[in-house]
Amino acid sequence: MTQHRRKGENDIMRKKEGEKKTTEATLLQELCGADAELYACLSIHLYETPLAAISQKDLEILIAEAEESGDYRRALDKAIFEGARDPAARARYVEVIQNLALKTVGAMERERETAEKKGLTDLAASLGRGIKNQRLMSERADDVLNVASQFYKEKLLALDESARREARGKSRQEAEREEKRILESEAAERKERREKRKGMGWAERREAKRQERRERLAAEKRKDAREEERQEAAQEEKRIGEQEQVAREERREERRES
């Protein structure tokens, strides 16, 4: 039974991951339109979570490291990301991307020549496709940045929305834990008062019961107030979600019209 349940949970997770990948591909395909070559190139170099996937090192450091290693991938990805977020410096980043792409072509051509000599046809073919992508990257660096700027704008907005949802979720969980703690504390106090009443005289016990009723009514009012706050928070969460959805749709329409 446990194995069956786990299998079901795994199937659901795989389905959700598949849906996410479809959504990601749709955004990039939307931005690239019918330009299959540009899509093939950018699907390698654009990231859903750029802040985590792209190196935090300065671009100049990455370029220096690439010159030593011959691997320009991290520097190129960084240049695309920075260029997408800094339209004022577009010309400079276009030049950097072109330069890095051409150096990547040179490195890949040398690798392909070695692979062909060793009879590694699959590797040689893969490198050939990579060379084609990098040449396109160099020839169309401006188009690359046009698409990347819109892609990363949407992804960073989505990450920001996700972070805010997570913060609200944590706040909601904390409120739920606090509510549980309050209820448990109040229950323990009632039990303690009942135990104390057992040793009281009749008049004292009657007054204690009256006090118990007053405290119970006050506790119910506090509980109702907390419930009202939770409902208001839930309504605000819904309002924010709807607002974000409207904003996403408006951005999508703007992209279609541009």
Image: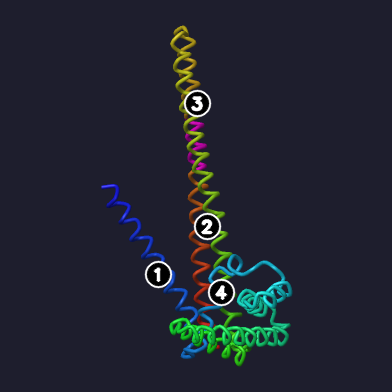
Q: Nearer the viewer, residue 219 or 172?
A: 172
Q: Which mark is residue 214?
A: 3
- Residue at the disc numbered 1: 19
- Mark 4 or mark 1: name the one nearer the start of the chain: 1
Q: Which residue is mark 2?
A: 236
Type of amino acid at the residue the image marks with label 2: Glu
Q: Are marks 3 and 1 in contact (CB under 8 Å)?
A: no
Looking at marks 4 and 2 on the same chain, the residue that comes earlier in the sequence is marked by: 4
Q: Can you tell which of label 3 and label 1 is closer to the viewer?
A: 1
Q: Is residue 39 visible?
A: no
Comes first in the chain, label 2 or label 3: 3
Q: CA distance from mark 4 to mark 1?
A: 17 Å
Q: Nearer the viewer, mark 4 or mark 1?
A: 1
Q: Residue at x 48, y 37 (%)?
A: 180
Mark 3 or 1 closer to N-term? 1
Q: Classify mark 3: helix, strand or loop.
A: helix
Q: Name the amino acid, label 3.
A: Arg
Residue at 52% x, 49% y: name it.
Answer: 172
Q: Which residue is mark 4?
A: 154
Circle 2 packing at 10 Å, graded few (<14), some (14-19), many (20+), is: few
